[in-house]
């Protein structure tokens, strides 16, 4: 099921806070015109924004029922998809900053695991930093927007989406740890399928460096645990 930016489970929406979307009408003049290459590039960003939105919905399922922050975070995350779809780049960048603020609040309230916070915040930052800057409007009604054709995203910015693949793998690893608290390399090989052992080891090493997980034991007996999990190995 595709989740719209205003379509939230009734239990997650504080009473009196649900806002309906504006009625559809003629396109506003604060959108961005794009050439063929720009459209192709923007499609990648829209797909990533949608994936991040789904990730936000998953992590907010663990928020206290009826918590206002759950609604605000979901709405802001979904709105980034809508803004990108209509070419409003500057508004999208501002909205990603709003999402990151809500994520910070959720982490401080201990409703969001630090590892999930860091993964989501970094992913939103990478997306915002990679968005093309030319031809942006600020969304003010009646403002005349110069629609400069978008250049191709430079190679270094395309490489950020290659890193995005690692981000998605790490999100899968994080989901596994959230459910099971610990894992061996063989467990993750089964979950990730065709991903090589070396690649998974590199992902685990990065998560260890960021203090999200810890390694206990060595070689075949090595276990990986969430950093807040008791690391004592029970006696044999």
Image (tube, rainbow, N blue to C red):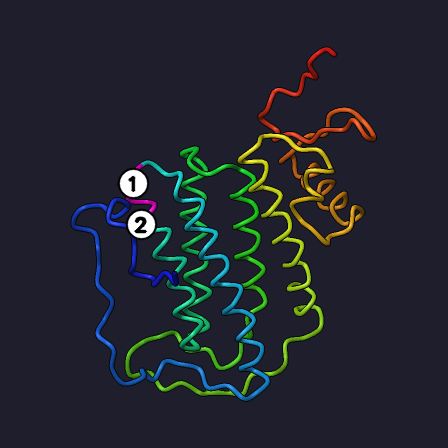
Q: Is residue 98 above or below residue 49?
A: above
Residue at coordinates 69% horizontally, 51% vertically from top-left?
A: 193
From the viewer's perspective, is residue 208 above or below residue 161? above
Q: Is residue 17 left or right of residue 195?
A: left
Mark identifier at residue 149: none
Image: magenta residue range: 65-70
User: Where residue 33 sits: x, y (%)?
Assistant: 46, 86
Q: Nearer the viewer, residue 235 or 156?
A: 235
Question: What x and y, as percent, mark residue 183?
Answer: 66, 33
Q: Residue at x 47, y 63 (%)?
A: 50
**Quick one: which residue is furthest to the top in this view?**
235
Give the image location of residue 3, x and y in percent.
36, 60
Residue 78 quadrant: bottom left
- Quarter-wise, where is residue 87 in the image? bottom left
Contact between labelled residues 1 and 2, with CB atoms less than 8 Å apart: yes
Q: Secondary structure at mark 1?
A: loop
**Is residue 233 depicted above or below 43 in this figure?**
above
Rendered location of residue 223, percent (x, y): 72, 29
Who's the residue at 20% across and 51% down the image? 17
**Label placed on residue 67:** 1
Q: CA distance from mark 2 to mark 1?
A: 7 Å
Q: Is residue 80 left or right of residue 5?
A: right
The residue to which callout 2 is attached is: 71
* Mark 2 secondary-structure assignment: helix
Is residue 68 shown in magenta? yes
Front residue (pair 205, 121): 205
Mark 2 neighbour density, 10 Å: few (under 14) some (14–19) many (20 or more): many
The picture quadrant where one finds residue 86 is bottom left
As rendered, which of 118 and 177 lies closer to the eye? Answer: 177
Q: Residues within 10 Å of mark 1 (few under 14, many from 20)?
A: some
Query: Which quadrant of the rendered structure holds the C terminus?
Result: top right
């Amino acid at each position: 099921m595709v989740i719209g930016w205003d379509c939230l489970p009734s239990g997650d929406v504080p009473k009196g806070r649900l806002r309906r979307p504006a009625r559809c009408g003629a396109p506003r003049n604060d959108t961005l015109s794009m050439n063929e290459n720009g459209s192709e590039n923007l499609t990648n960003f829209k797909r990533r924004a949608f994936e991040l939105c789904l990730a936000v919905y998953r992590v907010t399922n663990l928020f206290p029922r009826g918590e206002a922050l759950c609604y605000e975070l979901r709405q802001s995350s979904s709105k980034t998809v809508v803004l990108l779809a209509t070419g409003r780049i500057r508004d999208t960048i501002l909205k990603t900053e709003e999402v990151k603020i809500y994520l910070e609040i959720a982490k401080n309230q201990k409703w969001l695991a630090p590892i999930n916070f860091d993964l989501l915040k970094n992913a939103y930052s990478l997306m915002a930093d990679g968005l093309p800057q030319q031809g942006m409007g600020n969304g003010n009604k009646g403002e005349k927007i110069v629609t400069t054709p978008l250049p191709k995203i430079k190679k270094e910015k395309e490489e950020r989406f290659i890193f995005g693949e690692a981000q998605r793998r790490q999100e899968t690893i994080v989901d596994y740890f959230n459910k099971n608290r610990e894992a061996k390399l063989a467990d993750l090989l089964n979950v990730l399928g065709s991903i090589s052992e070396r690649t998974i080891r590199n992902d685990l090493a990065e998560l260890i460096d960021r203090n999200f997980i810890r390694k206990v034991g060595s070689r075949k007996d090595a276990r990986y645990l969430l950093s807040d999990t008791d690391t004592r190995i029970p006696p044999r």
